[in-house]
Image (cartoon, helix red, strand yellow):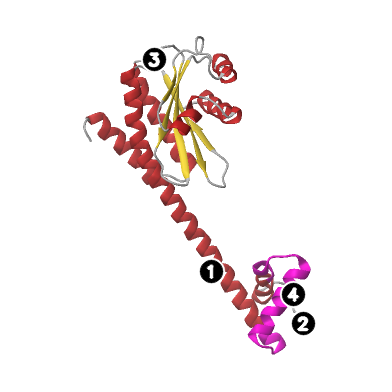
Amino acid sequence: MDTPEEQDDFERLHDLVAGMDDIKGLLDGMTELAATALSKAAGARIECAVALHRRKRPATIAGSSYQATLLDGIEQRLGDGPCLQALTTGTPVLLGDASKDARWPMFRRELADKGFCSVLGVPMDLGGGASAALNFFASGAGVFTEETTKEAERFADLAGNALRLGLRIAAAELRADDLSAALDHRTAIDMARGIIMAQNRCTGEEAFDILRRVSSTRNQKLHDVAAEVVAGIAGAPEKTYFEP
């Protein structure tokens, strides 16, 4: 880290990742830190929002305020604006004065309605499979100077590193949950097969065929059928008995 501010931001972002319950919570904390850092650099109140895009998932939107979150969501819905263009180009995109800039007319009307005049979109490098950009909003024109933009890029670099780590942790936890669920399902199926083998004096393959037929007939998942068999033996009022 080059400066005390960078060190502080790094440590705060690291703490967010270490204590995160989910990605949405991490993004909420990240935008609050980003808004604070840019407000200090610009000497003016700045709000921040972010939209995280991942394959086969809806966008996850977070913000330092309700209005910032709302505006980012509107930009996502419209499909065009500084933040989305920053994602496409991979470089910061500035809307310095919404009253004079002719780009994104629908988005500019929404900005004015919410009391904002300028926007800065800064992409974060997340690697393959995910993309996100920080969306900074200011009520005045000319707030995002060259110096402020560099500060936004600096913070986005740190935030991108933190978010990449957070995404890896979330993916690992999801895989662990999936594995645990798969093992639970496998255990229930094996136990149910053993119960049916004992009840019907059949082979393991025949018991498994019985489970599959019942699953198909009932249009019920195999592990749910197996769980019913096990529950019947484990103490339900009536035992579930399957004929071969």
Q: Quadrant of residue 194?
A: bottom right
What is the CA distance from the residue labelled 1 to the residue labelled 2? 27 Å
Q: Nearer the viewer, residue 186 or 56?
A: 56
Q: Which residue is mark 2?
A: 243
What label does residue 213 carry, if any?
Answer: 4
* CB-based contact (under 8 Å), mark 1 and mark 2: no
Asked whether 203 falls inside the magenta stretch, the response is: yes
Q: Residues within 10 Å of mark 3 (few under 14, many from 20)?
A: many
The local secondary structure at tag 4 comes to helix
**Image quadrant for the C terminus?**
bottom right
What is the CA distance from the residue labelled 4 to the residue labelled 2? 11 Å
* CB-based contact (under 8 Å), mark 4 and mark 3: no
In this image, 9 relative to 184: left or right? left
* Picture layout, residue 87 above or below residue 213: above
* Picture layout, residue 83 above or below residue 104: below
Q: Quadrant of residue 240?
A: bottom right
The local secondary structure at tag 2 comes to loop
Q: Which residue is mark 3?
A: 143
Give the amino acid at mark 4.
Answer: Arg
Question: What is the chief secondary structure element of the magenta stretch?
Answer: helix
What label does residue 183 carry, if any?
Answer: 1
